[in-house]
Amino acid sequence: MAVAATVAAPRSRRSASAWRRFLDAILARPTSAIGTVLLLAICAVALAVPMLPLAPPGEFVSDPYQTPSWTYPMGTDNLGRDLMTRVVWGARLGLSVALVSAGISTALGVVLGSIPAYYGGAWDDVFSRIFDIFLLVPAFFLVIVIVSLFGTSVVFVMIVIGLTTWPRSARIMRSQVLTLKPRAFVQAARAAGAGHLAVLFRHIVPNGLPPVVTNGTLLMSTAILTEAGLSFLGLGDANTTSWGRMILEGQRQLSLAPWLSIFPGLTMLVTVWAFNMVGDALNRFLSPQVREGTGRGAGWVVAPPLAGSAATTAAAAAACDGSLPADGDAPALLDVRDLKMYYRLEQGSVRAVDGVSFQVRKGECYGLVGESGCGKTSIGYTLLRLLPANGEILGGSVRFEGEEMLARSEASFRKVRWERMAMIFQSAMNALNPVQRVGDQMTRAYRLHRPDATPAEARARVEALFDLVGIDRGRMSSYPHEMSGGMRQRAIVALSLLLEPTLLIADEPVTALDVLVQDQILAEMEALRKRLGIAMILVSHDMGVMAETCDRVAVVYAGQIVEEADVATIFADARHPYTRALMHSVPDLDRPRERLLSLPGVPFDLRQEPVGCRFSGRCPLVEDKCRREAPPMIPVRPGHLSRCHFALDQRVLTIGASTGEEARA
């Protein structure tokens, strides 16, 4: 019993949390809240109508054409029937049609959209053409033809509406399956021995359902309007009470009794609007990006300009506690000062970038290295002002080519993003649209930024870049899944160079590639950097990549730069415990066998208020001072900074040395 209670408690808490999140999604916007309340009220009345003290919908209760009054709030129709009673019974029919038709359409769409997309080949092509044919013919006209030929019973109408609207759900599910099928978690499930159908319906379909469910609420609105349209045209079931039939009957007496059409029409309009608002709330509830957001929209959005640009920039420069000067002779291409960017959550914030300062010279390769979750990728996205919906730039200064970037409007910054400052995204497969040819994606991107360019000019530019990165031009007509991992990564490099930027941010550009391909890609990127004279910020967790590629390296931990120096100094004389731990956690085949160093504890929780050194919970040199006082950036020598109280203490150099001695012993 105790075990059962222990298991049940977390489940009940998760259920309660889900209901709270759904309630938050409804209350996030007044329109969603109002729509939900109205829809619940309409559903409650429709379900309870047989128990309400209302006359049967076909009973003659008074004289015809009675105007709305306390006795008959919506008046009576041309036969003396209570119009409010008929409107309520019409709601019962409308909701039944909406639920059954949308259920049939969504179920068919999920099955017929997911299975062909998962297995691919000829079946996927056949079903894709079927989707296209159905979508070319307006569903309402198709329903009219079928109902006219085969019958008008309400059950048959429900089935026909479901059978003619499923391709839209199927197309959405197909795109979701094609996007999710290559993901690592799907491949892991297959490697674990799961069958194809288990992988599809346990791993892929549940992750692709949110947009399909949201589309289902729109299908409900469509079903209500379709049934009402059929009844208005005289093709509905004559034995039922329908809003469309009421509007038709009222239309004949519109000048004599306009309320006969107005009340059922308004009720139908309110119901359809309420379904759409509930769909909007469902989208916020089911989408993690929107749910965690701050109300600015889903997914990746553009960060707004930072208020108070001049004062903020000056304050940031003054507050900076240390970053290396670019060079005595060469001005910095990029000058970042005290940059702060937090992710807002339901409870608290994640200090992903917290007071970061550094400079990048023209033509230089600058490395950002650290373990996963330390904030290095967030720095790159912050520089480009491309953040998740819950990301917010709180302060700092980013001067690029002498201009302040954070204070620029979005329209102004759009001319900088990708044209002067571009990015190589972490996963090539995720960065490329799986349902578009690679060449088409690149030519569209080029013409988006160069609207005056002709299709031939755009294609010529893409061909030149394919030659530059070593991809055969014939591959422009390939889909991303038809290219190898190394080829996709080269295509992403070509995409980043499309508009000839002066600064390239490479976020884990060789992740998930084998070692030989990694070396080839890095060598090609290095050659391109020197040939084109562009600067590059290389983001990686691999110290070996830093050693081979970078001129200077900044080590990132818990949202801050903890050490910065040229690459030779970092590897020969690192003065931060975390940096030394990173280096001694990588095997070296050129030296005798050593036991690799592992850090105790867990990384600093970026949701917590920092007190003292953020590395103190894992540092072997920790003292009380470390837990009380945050260390500044301490100059070790010209060009070398370390955020550690013991940066000048020789004990730092002993970290990692003991592991090698123990192994040799």
Image (cartoon, rainbow, N blue to C red):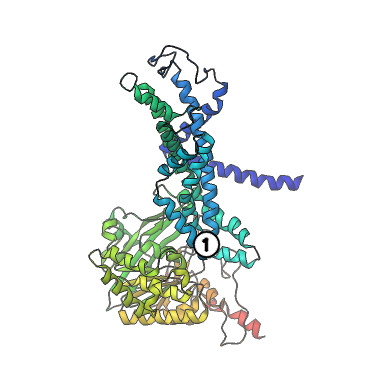
Q: Residue furthest right?
A: 1
Residue sitting at x 35%, y 64%: 337
**In the image shown, does 310 or 81 lie closer to the viewer?**
81
Disc 1 crowd, CA 10 A, few/some/many (<14, 14-19, 20+): few
Q: Residue furthest front?
A: 149
Q: In the rendered view, tell whether residue 167 sits above or below residue 383.
A: above
Residue sitting at x 54%, y 39%: 100
Can you see residue 179? no
Tell me how many marks there are. 1
| Residue 87 x %, y % | 46, 25
**In the image shown, does 575 or 561 lie closer to the viewer?**
561
Q: Amino acid at mark 1?
A: Trp
Q: State the quadrant of the C terminus.
A: bottom right
Q: What residue does disc 1 label?
A: 123
Q: Secondary structure at mark 1?
A: helix
The image quarter containing residue 661 is bottom right
Q: In the rendered view, tell whether residue 647 sits above or below residue 588.
A: above
Can you see residue 306? yes
| Residue 53 x %, y % | 54, 17
Q: Residue furthest top?
A: 63
Residue sitting at x 75%, y 46%: 2
Q: Is residue 484 left or right of residue 415?
A: right
| Residue 239 x %, y % | 51, 27
**In the image shown, does 483 or 514 lie closer to the viewer?**
483
**In the image shown, does 577 or 120 lie closer to the viewer?**
120
| Residue 61 x %, y % | 47, 13
Q: Is residue 598 left or right of residue 101?
A: right
Q: Is residue 327 left or right of residue 663?
A: left
Residue sitting at x 42%, y 36%: 225
